[in-house]
Image (tube, rainbow, N blue to C red):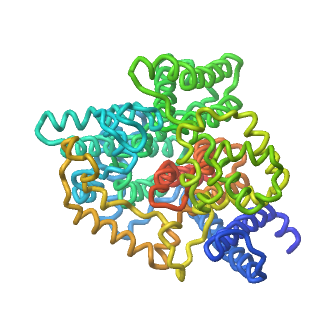
Amino acid sequence: MPVERLKQNRDMLMVVGTLAVLATIADMFRDTVGFSCNPINLVHVLGHMAFFCAAFMLGDYLIDRFLVGRKSTVGVPRQVHARWFDNLCDIAFSGIPQTYEFGGIVKLGAIIYACWSPLLVLLFPGVIWWDTRQQLLQYNGLPNALSDGVITDHHPILDTYLYGWFTDLGRALGSADAGVYAFCLVQAFLTACALACCLVLVCHMGGGRGVCLTLLAFLCLYWHLPIYASAMAKDATFLPFFLLFSVASIEVMRSRGRLLRAPGYLAVYVALLLLVSLTRKTGLILVLIVLVVVFFKVTGRRGRVVVAAMAVGASLFMTVLMLRAVLPALGCEPGGKQEVYGLMFQQSALLMRDHGEEVPKWQRQEIERAIGEDGKNNYTWFLTDSVKDPTFGKADELDFLAYLGAWAAGFLQHPLCYLEAYLGVQVGWYAMPAAGSEALSPYVTPVDGHNVSHVFPRSRDLGLSWSDATLGRSVESLVAWFQSTPVGMLVGAKALWSTWGMAFLLLEIKRRAPQKLYLMAPLVAANLVLWISPTSYTTESMRYLLPLLFWLPVSAAMTFASVASTE
């Protein structure tokens, strides 16, 4: 019996072991800023394994209890223990539409939005992130951190124009700050409606009253959702399109591609994948990963040709048409290539810092041509910006093949050095928050409420003047206090919303309903894109996590619906 049980849990033990090793590596970075061979790390591995085993077994037990409870109530009248509560649940469940009809989606979105409204009021007149400030300066032709006033596609230009248009509207009506707030409110409502579509999807998959109401309650009450859905930031603007694209992709796969035969649905799907690509720099990568899964799930030659055409078309539009036609027509300039090289530059910097004397002359010359002679001194273990930002402009003229050869040689010479540089940057996605650590904030999901102040260099030139961040700071402090508690620390862990959550759901789907693994395509795609982030440590890195913060609970609900479904 123990041997059989071990075989059944083999996949879980492999995943738990991997997560435990990664969490221990994060402890190394926290304690020594790099890899170390301290024997105490073995104790860390065992402790982390015990935690993950307990957490995964608890989750597995809860799903078992859910399935037992669902089977035992089939055909049995529901017991009424608290009539008022039961009536309230019935009203709420009846409010979830059975189709994607526009009116029903707007009504359910309005319910979610109403629950968000207290926080939306507290965050008046809207949170503006650092990147957005540069976009607003560019839109108005003012010098900024990235250009002398020209709009560049360092940030998505569609986002830049949207932010600029709303501030123009507010300025025309007497207050640019009001224009920012109007954008934040509209964006939050669109996101709420997109989440309403997610609820409809879960219902379509056989999610019962309990699953759907639990998801609805979470979407209405989890405070991070309105805080980030209402931020004027490119990753928040990306959210509603990502959510809708994910829902549409899953419906296409569930229909085996039949939905793509409808011209209207096909047009909407193409529009969504383009909007995902246009509102986030890594959006195209995410789209292509999902389309690969859609391609293999669709039946029939015609359906696969359509999916392949969409993938090729989106790629050509973003990499050729945008650069050669759209940007010049709008008077915009391409962004610097240093962003593409970020992780490679980071690895080269650590290589030169730790093994510079061993590197051959030709290799050293190519690396220094890329990151400069002082590049190794700019190395910061949790952030690529300190290495890549000084190469702004120079990276555009870099001989890529020559540098690639030098980079590859370094990988063959010192693979552990490259692994250390990479894992240091991505530490937030796998680290276990430590209550005794002074550096707790980088490993949890903080909020940026103080940025409701719209005062920054040259903000007056934009007409932005709101400076009172009292309420925003109060929201920020309250979230920080909760996340300093043992429960809040784990609930708010970045790793929970990314790597840990995905690993658990994949295990459960694989074990209980392997034929429905395709449902995890958007979740896996968002995680893969997450692991090429330029940092996971700073407060700003939270924006990379946003798609998972919103989509993981939907994926969890789909998992419960899938394992319980008899279709």
Residue 397 visible at all: yes
Q: Residue at x 65, y 51 (%)?
A: 373
Q: Position of residue 357 (x, y in %)?
A: 79, 59
- Which residue is located at x 81 percent, y 53 percent? 359
Above/below status of 107 relative to 467 = above
Nearest the viewer among 233 and 329 is 329
Across and down, in percent, residue 447 comes to 39, 61
Q: Quadrant of residue 38?
A: bottom right
Residue 501 in view in this figure: no
The quadrant of the rendering that contains the C terminus is top right
Question: Which residue shows up at 56% across the image and 72% down it?
Answer: 433
On the rendered structure, is 177 left or right of 245? left
Q: Quadrant of the N terminus?
A: bottom right
Q: Position of residue 412 (x, y in %)?
A: 84, 50
Q: Which image quadrant is residue 303 in?
A: top right
Q: Is residue 334 above or below residue 520?
A: above
The foreground one among 386 and 47 is: 386
Residue pictured at 19% horizontal, 33% vertical: 169
In the rendered structure, the answer to whether residue 189 lies left or right of residue 561 reads left
Q: Position of residue 178 (x, y in %)?
A: 18, 44
Q: Is residue 40 left or right of residue 74?
A: right
Question: Position of 317 compared to 363: left or right?
Answer: left
Judge by depth and name the residue closer to the eye, 255 or 178: 178
Q: 522 or 429, which is in the foreground? A: 429
- Total number of numbered discs in the rendering: 0
In the image, residue 159 sits, relative to residue 16, either above or below, namely: above
**Quarter residue 449 falls in:** bottom left
